Image (cartoon, rainbow, N blue to C red):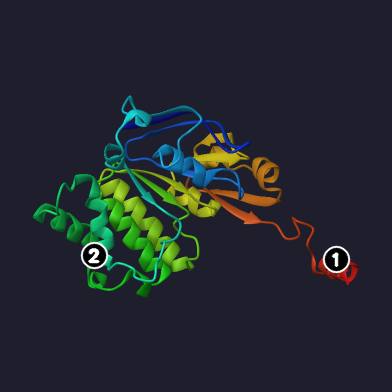
Amino acid sequence: MQLIVDGLRFSYQSSEVLKGVSFELNDHEILGVIGPNGSGKTTLLKCINMVLKPKQGLVLFDGNDVKRMERLDVAKIFGYVPQNAQLTFDTPTVFECVLMGRRPYVSWRCSPEDFEKTWSALAALGIERFAMRRLSELSSGEQQKVLIARALAQEAKVLLLDEPTSNLDIKHQLEVMNIMKDLVIFKGLSAIVAIHDLNLASIYCDKLLLLREGEVVAVGKPKDVLTVERIKDVYGVDVDIEIKDDRVCITVLPNSLNCSPSNLISVNRKKA
């Protein structure tokens, strides 16, 4: 499997959000997409699976132009896991939500194979016990597992995860990231994950793509992308970096934003 993104551009009306983004993803790889808020991470994921149509550029899966594929064929390649579950008043059960992942393979009605794949996905995420519960009844971490199970039932080749650890505590962050890593290793998938936590990105991702205002600043191994100078330049904060077992450990330095208590008091007095 090889995914090539070449020169991707996208605009919301007159505002260009992606400005020639290019990278490659290979078998059993996890690519972390990092960058400040508004740098184009979510838009990039949506352009890759053609939820949004790029203005320019190519997305090639094993040499095939994704833009020319039928919608259901694209869904057999990419499993999109949004940042938060879109809940309505009458939310589906967990089983129904995961079964929706079988949509690319269903003709008139679900087959025994579709039900089997759904139960298998639930088991892989360890959430069979939630099968008959409403999605809205679950915690944020549990909902995230359901959305990943749906992508797994979809039998996608590439998982696209949009900030899967947002609003989760430390334990559930690690749980979700470990699940992603296990799926890549044991299910033979690849993954692209938009993520804010640079330390988690360094631990779990094979490569990083650093974006700023829709442009690629750097792409490569975490230890090559995450440097003191680059983080200062892109994020505007001072950090200390330590390399442990080829992984980057980042510590934000105190007062790197010049927001000491005395400064905050001074600002508040000016406002008053």
Question: With 66 as the anchor, is 52 left or right in this view?
Answer: right
Position in image of residue 139 (x %, y %): 40, 72
- Crowdedness of circle 2 by 10 Å Cα count: few (<14), some, many (20+)? many
Q: Nearer the viewer, residue 85 or 169?
A: 85
Residue 73 in view (yes/no): yes
What whole-number distance in Å separates the C-alpha atoms at marks 2 and 1? 52 Å
Residue 40: assigned label: none
**Vertical position of residue 172 compared to residue 53: above or below:** below
Position in image of residue 177 (x %, y %): 40, 56
Residue 207 in view (yes/no): no
Q: Nearer the viewer, mark 2 or mark 1?
A: 2
**Residue at 14%, 53% in the rendered image:** 109
**Residue at 59%, 44% in the rendered image:** 39
Question: With 193 as the anchor, is 117 left or right in this view?
Answer: left
Q: What residue did someone put label 1 on?
A: 267
Mark 1 residue type? Val
Position in image of residue 79 (x %, y %): 33, 47
Dot 1 lies on which element?
helix
**Vertical position of residue 55 compared to residue 261: above or below:** above
Q: What residue did someone put label 2 on?
A: 95
**Residue at 88%, 72% in the rendered image:** 272
Quarter of the image with the N terminus in it? top left
Position in image of residue 204 (x %, y %): 43, 50
**Vertical position of residue 261 compared to residue 150: above or below:** below
**Vertical position of residue 190 compared to residue 240: above or below:** above
Mark 2 residue type? Phe
Identify the mark nearer the N-term, 2 or 1. 2
